[in-house]
Amino acid sequence: MKSELGICYYPEHWPEAQWAEDAARMRATGLSWVRIGEFAWSLMEAEPGKLSFGWLDRAIETLGAAGLKVVLGTPTATPPRWMIEKHPDMLAVDEAGNPRKFGSRRHYCFSHKGYREESARIARLLGERYGKNPHVQAWQIDNEYACHETTLSYSRAAVEGFRDWLAQRYQSPEALNRAWGNIFWSMEYSDFSEIDAPNLTVTEPNPAHVMAWRRYSSDAVVAYNAAQVTALRPLTDKPLIHNYMGRVLEFDHFDVGNDLDIASWDSYPIGFLSDRLTDSPEHKRRYLRQGDPDMQALHHDLYRAVGKGRWWVMEQQPGPVNWAPFNPAPLPGMARLWAWEAIAHGAEAVCYFRWRQAPFAQEQMHAALLRPDSAPAPALAEAAQVAEEIASLPEIRPAQAPVAILFDYASAWAWETQPQGADFDYFELVLDTYRGLRKLGLSVDFLPLDANVSDHHLILAPGLFTLPESLKASLAARDGITILGPRSGTRSPEFEIPVPLPPALPGLDSTIALTESLPPSAPEPLAQGGAVLHWLERLEGTAEVVEETQSGQPVLTRSGGLHYLAGWPDETAFARILTRACAELGLAVTEMPEGLRCRDTESHRFYVNYAPEPIDFDGVTIATAGVTWKDLP
Ligand code: GAL
């Protein structure tokens, strides 16, 4: 199947008389998919049990009759006001203990059993009515789990759910006390009912307690999603999808993804650069109207893994957004580039957010394909161009990359719990690793920890909280090069320092004897150039040393293909380490010009130019905000 384009549409925001014209215009633009319904609960059910689906029947019919395929959203991210009357204790509670009030969205607590049932009920009603509707070709469950920091809720329902979860996991309070080390500071419990959420403690809570809470909270998202999946599955054979977000690690997306058919995510490149990245002001100025050159691709590759190969962009930024600290407009061409980049990474569909800019309520300042007066906004013509280009090209199929990064959500929770250095951040470490690879022109896959590790020439495993023994063994046994660290395998699942001391890799005699974190002002220079930032582990042992500090302290050691990296390399050091590994593997690398990135598919090499100037490379000129592809031999 060729990739397709789509649009997010809110029929409930516009007069019914306008729907047919909108639908015809969507088709004329070359759009195939339209996502609707995900916030419309108050119109579907104005009072408990008072259902009105007539408007939705007509909307689906109008859109479908125009030739559009509908993605129908379950409206559970926006429980209506009456729901709060019915379940006053369903509101999520923040870390300070305050209920999060009605008046925007995502105000529910994942652990609340009553709300979980209400969500399954509305999903079932929609499934019964539209599960076999020929126009409804896919489903979106809820909207952006975790958005607005809503995974962790400190409600009564969550604390009760946590206690049950703990009782199942540990079986007895004594076992829990031992596992957590609660003898420290007299924190022992004699009954599960005594255990609370780890908020509002005087100083830091036990990291094992926090880690359990994080795992429980992630499992609550999984269970909440599964309740809707269970309701819908028997009623439809169409794919079930969730739209994940950028740089959101609060729950385990692999676990949620296991219950779904397709992963999708919402890509807002310029919003993310302003709001979610910590790069230098120079970097942010250079990429102000394009977004970071690696942020989107990283998520495309990660969510391809979450979707086991099947993934979409459910929302694509079309122009300025409303929610970042600053909201510049994209350079002309970026709405096309972002879509093509997603397709080059294997997206089955890219849907722009949204059709027409809303003149009312919260997102008035958010651009769309149309202005509020229905005149075209700049992205409309770019979307139409992408649709024409897709039609003119053969199907683009993703290829397996030569390199993979092992990725693990629990590692993000662990290092948030115990950063040890104020700027130690799991996502940033993964992003730096990913950037280092992409700057050498490499295509990258992500793998969860239970994946097969024998298919990639080079595997990087930065910052993994725990390393299961089985994974250590398969990494040590595989062909190719594996680089683990920094910090990988330095804790047990119960947040203890394992003995023998980490990383304890089979056949690699390197032991972490001491760990230090480094402030930004104190990088540790390396003998061959570049430096280690943020984090440096002192290694003992007889393993061969590949990189060392200027003072002779080992930083990268190896035994055969198995390497341990004891620090966080800067850009120069990463480039050298990765280039050396690729040379040894016979993998071709090309130093990419600043802002140019490439991605290989089965048939083509795609170049996307994020730089604010045109770039001559590989015999072609790639325009500013341009995309070019070449046939692969
Ligand atoms: C997403 C969300 C949409 C809309 C959009 C604005 O996070 O799913 O409903 O709010 O952001 O950029």
Image (cartoon, helix red, strand yellow):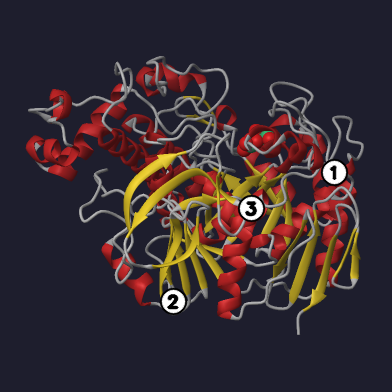
Mark 3 nearby-residue class (10 Å; few <14, some 14–19, many ≥20): some
> Where does label 2 land, which residue?
454
Three-letter code for the amino acid on which mark 1 is drawn? Glu
Callout 2–callout 3 Cβ contact below 8 Å: no
Image mark for residue 21: 1
Choose between 630 and 494: the one closer to the eye.
Answer: 494
Choose between 496 and 449: the one closer to the eye.
Answer: 496
Callout 1–callout 3 Cβ contact below 8 Å: no
Image quarter of residue 227: top left
Question: Can you see residue 524?
Answer: yes
Q: Is mark 3 within 8 Å of ligand 1?
A: no
Q: Residue at x 34, y 43 (%)?
A: 219
Vertical position of residue 348 compared to residue 603: above or below: above
Q: Residue at x 46, y 50 (%)?
A: 253
Among the two numbered marks 2 and 3 on one chain, the one whose residue lies closer to the N terminus: 2
Vertical position of residue 131 compared to residue 345: above or below: above
Choose between 438 and 498: the one closer to the eye.
Answer: 498
SS assignment at label 3: helix
Three-letter code for the amino acid on which mark 2 is drawn? Ser
Give left or right: position of 550 versus 120. Answer: right
Distance Cα–Cα, label 1 vs label 3: 52 Å
Residue 233 on image: x %, y %: 43, 56
Distance Cα–Cα, label 2 vs label 3: 28 Å
Mark 1 nearby-residue class (10 Å; few <14, some 14–19, many ≥20): few
> Where does label 3 land, which residue?
571
Q: Residue at x 51, y 49 (%)?
A: 568
